[in-house]
Image (cartoon, helix red, strand yellow):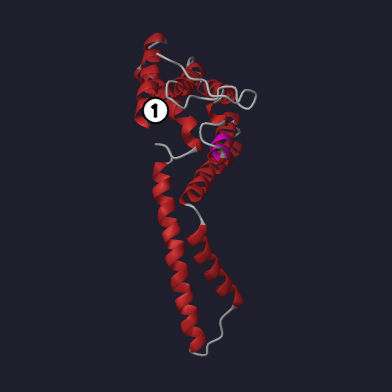
Amino acid sequence: MTGKTHLTIGAAIGAAASVYYPFTLQHAALFVGIAGFSALAADLDGTSMLSSKLGKLSKLIRELMLWGGVAFIGIIAYLFFAGHPVSPIVIGSAAAALLLGLVMKQGAIRNALVSVVGCILMYVGFTYQMNWLIGFGLFVAWVPWLKHRGMTHTVWATLIWAAIGWGLEQQLRTEGIAVVATLGYLSHLVADSLTPSGVKWLYPLYKKSIKLRM
């Protein structure tokens, strides 16, 4: 399923929840936003709508490291032949930048950027004593390094997401947030189960993909 499809399903869940629970415009916007985000969150383990912008940034970083390394090597070569002393640290830094630019995958850089965002969320959570935000930050920092359609596409990840949603509900004191977050996340797994690849709902206890037929 595409990110747009998951987002549409999540938004529909949020809209339905805004009708089911006491309606206010604020609650409607909150439900739609949470459900839509939750429907996309499982794909943080790979390139998705949530991390695609970071993918572009990772490409830029890789190119800057590559050409920055080339430029540094050129400057060092000029200084060397001109008879000027060059610090080994500068030489090592230039070589490291060049090598990283050549060998580092854009996906790895993107994953690192997503993890940085997660660490920032954890820091804010610690600072303001918001346990749900700490958990959310840990989730964001951890999942980019997982295999796509692996642990994030399981019942266990859904339960973790439900706990995060429950914590947010307790802080905002708005009934329905935990349910909306859980259903939004769950909708992603159900939708992906309709695809030929299916979803390993009980991984690693049961490693075969479960496929649903309409």
Q: Position of residue 75 (x, y in %)?
A: 46, 78
Q: Residue at x 51, y 37 (%)?
A: 45
Task: Find out whether residue 141 is within the magenta segment.
Answer: yes
Q: Looking at the picture, tell me which residue is in the foreground, 163 or 22.
A: 163
Classify residue 178 as left or right of residue 35. right
Q: Residue at x 56, y 85 (%)?
A: 85
Classify residue 152 as left or right of residue 48. right
Q: Residue at x 42, y 37 (%)?
A: 48
Magenta highlight range: 139-143
Q: Residue reaching furthest bottom?
A: 83
Q: Position of residue 140 (x, y in %)?
A: 53, 37
Q: Looking at the picture, tell me which residue is in the foreground, 202 or 42.
A: 202
Task: Find out whether residue 88 is within the magenta segment.
Answer: no
Q: Position of residue 63 (x, y in %)?
A: 42, 60
Q: Looking at the picture, tell me which residue is in the foreground, 16 or 191.
A: 191
Number of disc labels = 1
Quarter of the image for residue 90 reads: bottom right
Quarter of the image for residue 4 reads: top left
Q: Position of residue 150 (x, y in %)?
A: 55, 31
Q: Is residue 53 above or below residue 101?
A: above
Q: Is residue 110 above or below residue 198?
A: below
Q: Is residue 23 above or below residue 40?
A: above
Q: How crowded is the residue under tag 1: few (<14 C-alpha within 10 Å), some, or many (20+)? A: few
Which amino acid is tagged 1? Answer: Met
Q: Main secondary structure of the magenta part?
A: helix
Classify residue 80 as left or right of residue 206. left
Image quarter where the N terminus lies is top left
Q: Secondary structure at mark 1?
A: loop
| Residue under label 1 | 1
Image quarter where the C terminus lies is top left
